[in-house]
Image (cartoon, helix red, strand yellow):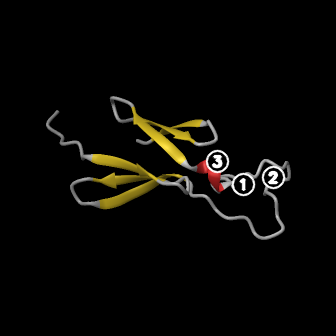
């Protein structure tokens, strides 16, 4: 079709964040996964169930569980699988 696809890369960190980067421009495009956010002192969690999870988009209050250990992108670049220390796998539509 003659249209050039941009080269992208993903990075992950111990705080649970996953970032999408433009390889050619060396610039961050977007945050794919939310960052870990520390809980205020004396507060267990945002959901009240003892899970340590905060509300939507807030990541988890348990830093150990949110640490990203692996990333895998689909061949067509549409999906990104993210594996975390807490044995969870999340799949994101990154288009």
The location of residue 39, given as percent across then percent down, is 73, 64
Quote the CA–CA distance across marks 1 and 3: 16 Å
Which residue is pictured at 82% across the width and 64% down the height? 43
Dots 1, 2 in contact, CB < 8 A: yes
Quote the CA–CA distance across marks 2 and 3: 17 Å
The location of residue 4, given as percent across then percent down, is 18, 42
Residue nearest the viewer, comparing 30 with 88: 88
Q: Nearer the viewer, mark 1 or mark 3?
A: 3
* Quadrant in which residue 30 is drawn: bottom left
Residue identified by numbered label 2: 47
The location of residue 19, given as percent across then percent down, is 43, 53
Image quadrant holding the C terminus, namely top left
Residue identified by numbered label 1: 55
* Quadrant in which residue 3 is drawn: top left
Q: What is the crowding at mark 3: few (fewer than 14 residues within 10 Å), some, or many (at least 20)? A: some
Residue identified by numbered label 3: 65
Quote the CA–CA distance across marks 1 and 2: 7 Å
Query: Does residue 65 appear to the left or right of 49 in the view shown?
Result: left
Which residue is pictured at 47% across the width and 40% down the height? 70
In this picture, is 1 found above or below 6? above
Image quadrant holding the N terminus, namely top left
Which residue is pictured at 52% across the width and 46% down the height? 68
Q: Residue furthest left?
A: 2
Residue nearest the viewer, comparing 65 with 45: 65
């Amino acid at each position: 079709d003659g249209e050039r696809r941009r080269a992208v890369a993903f990075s992950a960190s111990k705080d649970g964040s996953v970032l999408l980067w433009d390889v050619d421009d060396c610039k961050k495009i977007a945050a794919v996964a939310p960052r870990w956010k520390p809980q205020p002192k004396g507060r267990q969690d945002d959901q009240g169930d003892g899970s340590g999870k905060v509300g939507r988009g807030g990541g988890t209050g348990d830093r150990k569980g949110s640490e990203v250990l692996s990333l895998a992108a689909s061949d067509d670049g549409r999906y990104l699988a993210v594996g975390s220390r807490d044995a969870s796998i999340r799949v994101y539509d990154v288009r």
